[in-house]
Image: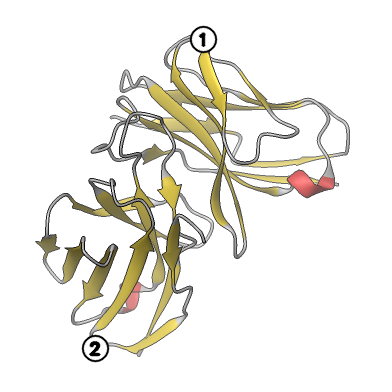
């Protein structure tokens, strides 16, 4: 089954403790991206990747890192999480990130930073 | 001005009624558009694609007005299960990789 797999589904951590949220897709998509969703603000892009070893900042990249060493995986890293990073996170992918393409979303990660 | 704007609602709709809402976009070069449905704290799921003037799928109709730069979604014969937030998504008109999202329109269908 074609899908984007995101883990964990829920994560509670403390300020400053490094964490990684994993994202993997099995559709051979070139384009992958990370979003955070906060009430009233909608989905905001954190980082995106057009291909292996090609990443770029989205609208809210501060406090986050990503890597794209393999096509299928695009982990989101919070080196030193802070409470303002408490949010619902989604990973998504599409074939090339082009103009007629739909996005496939992972099931989301609810992160709470205490 | 935001790239993509939606009325946040909520639109309170009696079961069986029709509801319609819009999504306006600022980039006149945008070629395609998508409506996603999102249930509370779940991932957005594709509802409809809009590539030309419009699209229809059962009780759902999407229309595109390029002159005024908006797309609309109409839901006929609303069901309780239609209660959700509907997101407007606009892919990049070129291949720059930045999809634009509306903040979503909440629809609540009541018995």
Q: Where is residue B33 shown, x and y percent of the image?
A: 27, 51
Q: Where is residue A29 shown, x and y percent of the image?
A: 34, 22
The front one of A11 and A66 is A66
Would you say B84 lies left or right of A112 here? left
Q: CA distance from mark 2 to mark 1?
A: 50 Å
Residue appearing at x 34%, y 29% in the figure: B95
Residue highlighted by disc 1: A53
Quarter holding residue A21: top right
Question: Which circle, 2 or 1, is nearer the viewer?
Answer: 1
The front one of B77 and A50 is A50
Marked residue chain, label 1 = A
Residue highlighted by disc 2: B17
Residue appearing at x 39%, y 31% in the figure: A93
Q: Where is residue A11 shown, x and y percent of the image?
A: 70, 40
Quarter holding residue A81: top right
Q: Quadrant of the C terminus of chain B?
A: bottom left
Quarter holding residue A46: top right
| Mark 2 residue element | loop
Marked residue chain, label 2 = B
Neighbourhood count class around disc 2 (C-alpha, 10 Å): few under 14, some 14–19, many 20 upward? few
């Amino acid at each position: 089954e074609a899908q984007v797999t995101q883990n964990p589904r829920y994560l509670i951590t403390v300020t400053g403790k490094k964490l990684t949220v994993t994202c993997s897709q099995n559709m051979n998509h070139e384009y992958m991206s990370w979003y955070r969703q906060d009430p009233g603000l909608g989905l905001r892009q954190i980082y995106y990747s057009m291909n292996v070893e090609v990443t770029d900042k989205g609208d809210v990249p501060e406090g986050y890192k990503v890597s794209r060493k393999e096509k299928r995986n695009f982990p989101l890293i919070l080196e030193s999480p802070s409470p303002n990073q408490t949010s619902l996170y989604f990973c998504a992918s599409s074939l090339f990130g082009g103009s007629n393409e739909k996005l496939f979303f992972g099931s989301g990660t609810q992160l709470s930073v205490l | 001005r935001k790239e993509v704007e939606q009325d946040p609602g909520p639109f309170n709709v009696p079961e069986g009624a029709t509801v319609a809402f819009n999504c306006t976009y600022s980039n006149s070069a945008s070629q395609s558009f998508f409506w996603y449905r999102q249930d509370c704290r779940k991932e957005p799921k594709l509802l409809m694609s809009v590539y030309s003037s419009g699209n229809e799928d059962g009780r759902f109709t999407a229309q595109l007005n390029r002159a005024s730069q908006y797309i609309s979604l109409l839901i006929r014969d609303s069901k309780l299960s239609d209660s959700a937030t509907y997101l407007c998504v606009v892919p990049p008109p070129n291949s720059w990789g930045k999809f634009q999202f509306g903040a979503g329109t909440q629809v609540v269908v009541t018995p």
